[in-house]
Amino acid sequence: MFKFLAKKSRFFWVSTVFFYSFSSLGFSNDEDVLVDPVVLTIPKPSVGIETLLSTRDPIQPIPANDGASLLQVIPGFSVVRKGGIGGDAVFRGLAGSRLNFILDGMEFLGGCGLRLDPPTAYIFPETYDSAKLIKGPQTVRYGNGNSAGVVLFDRSAKKVNGLRAESAVTAGSWGRKDLLAVIEYGSGLMSFEGDFSHGESDDYKDGNGDEVHSAYERDSGSMVFGLQPADDFNVEFDVIVSEAESSNSDRNVDGSLFDRTSFGVLLEKGGDSSKLSLRAYTTAIDHIMDNFNRRTTTNCGSGTDNRCVLMNVARQTDGMRIGLALHVGESAAVNIGADAKQDRHTSRNFMNKSRAVASAFDSAARIKDFESEMVGAFLEVDLTVSENAHVISGVRTDYWNSSRFQNVGNTNTQSLFLGDDDQSLVSGFMRLEITDPNRIVNGYVGYGISERPMDYWEATTFNGITAGDVVNIQPERNHQFDVGINISSENFSSNVSLFFSDIDDYMLTVDAATDSVTNVQVERWGGEIDMRYDVSSYSSLFGSVSYVSADNETDNTPLAQTPPLELQLGLDHSVNEWSFGFLARYVDTQTRIDAGKGTVVGFDRATATPSFYTLAVNAGFEINSQSYFSVGVDNLLDEDYFEHINRTNSSAITGFITDNTIGVKEPGMTLWLKAGIEF
C-alpha cells in the first residue's frame, strides 16, 4: 500500500514542507508541547517497578525505526541486530515470549521461524505516545509468561478540543530519513486521531568503513475514531496498516515484505469508581523472505537459475480482553478480567527454484503449520495498608493448547499433523511498595511466579513438538524476587532495581545439525542502577550500570546469551533555549559463554565478545513552545565493534562482511538531526 512512497525520497521532503506550512493556520490546542528538545540518553530514574519513555522525544543513540531499538535507552536492555531494523529486544538476557509486548491492548507475534520479523518489527514507535516497561513477573494483567517483564506501547487518553497537528522529521547519515505526521480532532461527542510514519535508510558503514547489508524502507498509517455518547461511555474503533522491507546481514535471505493489518474496537463503561472495558482485535501478518530481491545470489536469475529461495509466512491473531476495574472502599483497587487469543500460522516455501517459479509464489496455497489458543483469567489487587504503603498482588491462570503441522516436502500441497500439547498454567505475585513523597528513600520488594508454555519457535524451529505426537519439553516456571530502592532529594535521584531468579525447566535452544530445545535448571541474579545529580540549575551528571549473572546448573555452564557488564556516564547542560549533552558508554568483555546454545533470538559464538566503548554528543534548541530541533553525533570516535547479544554475519552476501565468526557490526560515526513542530 505504501511501497511507492518509500521508493521516492522526495515524498519525505515534500511532506515535511506541507506539514510545517500548517503552523500559520492557528490550530487550537489546549495542551502543552508534547516533545522535549533535550535529547534523552538515559531515562530519568523511574518510580517503583516501572520505567516510562516518551516515544517522540529525541533519543541518543538515534534508535532504528522500530520498537526494539527505542528500548535500548533503558538500562538492562539489549537488541539483537540483524541489519538496519527488525532487532529483537532482550531484557536482562531474556527475550521472545519471556518479554511480552502489548500495543494498545493488542498482542501478536511475527511469522519468521528464525525471527526475522519479531513483533517489534511491526512497531512504529512515534505513532504511540509512550512505552512503559514493567520489570519482572510483577503483573498478571497483560497475558501469559512475562518472566522478564512486559512492555506497553500506548496512546494517551488525552482530550483535544478542536483541531491539532504535529509533525517531526529526522535526517541522518547513510540516507536516514524519518517522517511523522499526526492530526487529531476532538469535540464533545467524537474524536479522531490519524498517524503516518515513514522511515528509510541506505546500508550503513561500521567503524572500519565497511558497508553492512542493512538498508530498509518502512511506512505505517493508523486511525482511531472515538465516540462518547455519554460521560461514562466511550467507544473506539482503530485500524493500523504498515509495510516494510529490509536487508539483513545475518542470514541468507532478506525481508522483502513486512505487512501488518490490524482492526480493533474498545468499549468502556463507567467512571473513576468502577469501569468495565472490552477490547477485541484481529491482526494479520504477511512476511516474505527471499534471496534475490535485495541481494545478488549466484545461480538465481542467471546461470543455472536453480538457487532461488522464497518463503512466504503469515500469521492471523484474534484476541479479546474483558476487564473490570473498581475501588472497594477507600483502601482497595481491584482489576479482574479474562483474555483469550487464537493464533494460526501458515507457510508456502520455494527452495532452490528458478526465479520465475519463486516469484510466482502467490499462486500456491498457504499451508497451515501451527495453531494455538490461550485463554486466561486474572485478579490483581492494590491494597492501601497505610497512607504511603501499598501491597499489590495478583493471580492468573491460563489454559493453552497448540498443534504442529508440516508443509510436506515444501511442496505447498499438504499439511501433515505432527503432534500437539496442552497445559494449564498458574502465575502470581505479591509486592510491597513504599511511596512517601516526603521521604528521601522509598522502594519495593516483591516475589513473583510465572509459568509459560513453549512458544511457536520452540515448538517448531527447535522441535519442541515432533512427529508421532512427541512433546520434548515441559513448561518453564520462573521464581523471582525483585527489590527496588528509589532515592530522591533536592538535587539527587537514583533508582536501584535488583532481582534474583530460579527458573525450573528453562527452555534452552541448541544450534546443531537438527535444532533442538531442552529443559535445564537456571539461576540468575543482577539488576540496574541509574542516578542523576544536579550540579547546578543548568547542569546534571547522570549514569547507569547494569549487570546479569546467570548459570545453567544442569550442565554446570554459564547460561548462554547473558549480557555483559555495561556502564554509562553523561552530562546534560541547559541554558535558556539551548541544551547540550554528552554520553560515554562502556561494555565489558563477555567471557561467560556456552557456544552454540541460546534462545529463540540468538546463540553464543565460539569465542568471547571483546569490550568496547563509545562516545556521543548532542545539542537541542527550543525555537518556541511548539517547535524544536536537536542534533547529535553517535559513536563520535568511529569505534569498530559489535554487541555480545547479537546475530552473526552470513557468509553468503556478495560485497559485504562475510566473517560468520563475529557479530553484525554496529554503525560507525553517525550524524543526525531531528526537528518537530506542534500546532
Image (cartoon, rainbow, N blue to C red):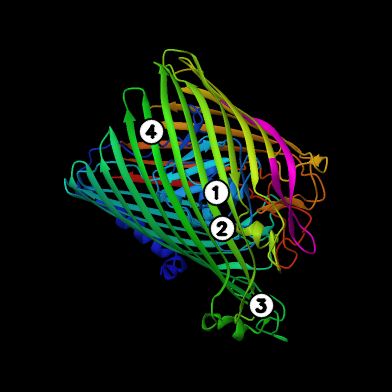
Q: Secondary structure at mark 3?
A: helix
- Residue 565 visible somewhere in the drawing: no
Front position in the image: 356 or 557: 557
Q: Are marks 1 and 2 in contact (CB under 8 Å)?
A: no
Q: Viewed as shown, does residue 209 lie left or right of 109?
A: right
- Mark pair 1, 2: CA separation: 28 Å
Q: Give the residue at mark 4.
A: 334
Front position in the image: 590 or 34: 590
Q: Residue at x 51, y 50 (%)?
A: 67
Location of the C terminus by quadrant is top left
| Mark 3 or 1: the one toward you | 3
Q: Secondary structure at mark 2?
A: strand
Magenta-drawn stretch contains 523: yes
10 Å crowding of disc 4: few (<14), some (14-19), many (20+): some
Q: Viewed as shown, does residue 636 lie left or right of 6?
A: right
- Residue 204 visible somewhere in the drawing: yes
How far across and down, in percent of the image, does residue 331 sit? Answer: 36, 22
- Mark pair 1, 4: CA separation: 32 Å
How far across and down, in percent of the image, does residue 77 sit? Answer: 60, 40
